[in-house]
Every structure is written in C-alpha cells, then in structure tokens.
Image: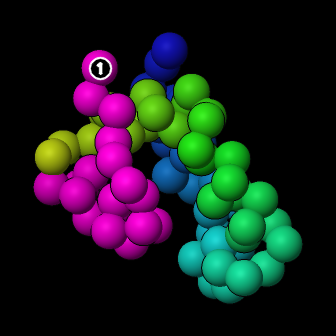
Amino acid sequence: MTQSKAIRCEKCPLRAQYDKNPHSLLGRIWRWHINFCPGWKMYMKSLSEDQRKEITQKYFLKSVDKN
C-alpha cells in the first residue's frame, strides 16, 4: 500500500472522535476497529519505534504486530 494510507490513519475522523471522547459510540467503534484493520497495522509499521511505543501507550494496545 502507499504512504497515503498511513496519512489517512493519522487524520482519521473516527480517531479524532476517540481522542476527544473515548467513551463515545464512534470512538469505541474506532478503537474496536483498529484491532483487526490491515490499514492500521501498516500505519503502525510505518512509524518509528518511539512513535509506536507512544501510540501503544496512548491507546492501551497490547502489542504491535512487527511482521
């Protein structure tokens, strides 16, 4: 996939909704969605190790797929 996929994840309106109010319906849908979204996995792989750690902590992710 292209780098534009990562940019869309970074500026995703659902992600912004989660950041604004994690308990909102759209925010919870986004958080559930990133558990299996192939675009999110590619986005995470495109980040530096420090950025991955920061996002993992911010969104309470259990692990990051490094394959």
- For this view, does 47 lie left or right of residue 13? left
Q: Position of residue 65 (x, y in %)?
A: 34, 33
Q: Residue at x 27, y 42 (%)?
A: 47
Q: In the depicted view, which residue is nearer to us: 55 or 8? A: 55
- For this view, does 42 lie left or right of residue 29? left
- For this view, does 59 lie left or right of residue 49? right
Q: Position of residue 25 (x, y in %)?
A: 84, 72
Write down the region rendered in magenta: 50-67
Q: Position of residue 54 (x, y in %)?
A: 26, 64
Q: Position of residue 35 (x, y in %)?
A: 58, 44
Q: Residue at x 56, y 30 (%)?
A: 39
Q: Quadrant of residue 8?
A: top right
Q: Quadrant of residue 62?
A: bottom left
65 within the magenta span: yes
Q: Which residue is mark 1?
A: 67
For the C terminus, the quadrant is top left
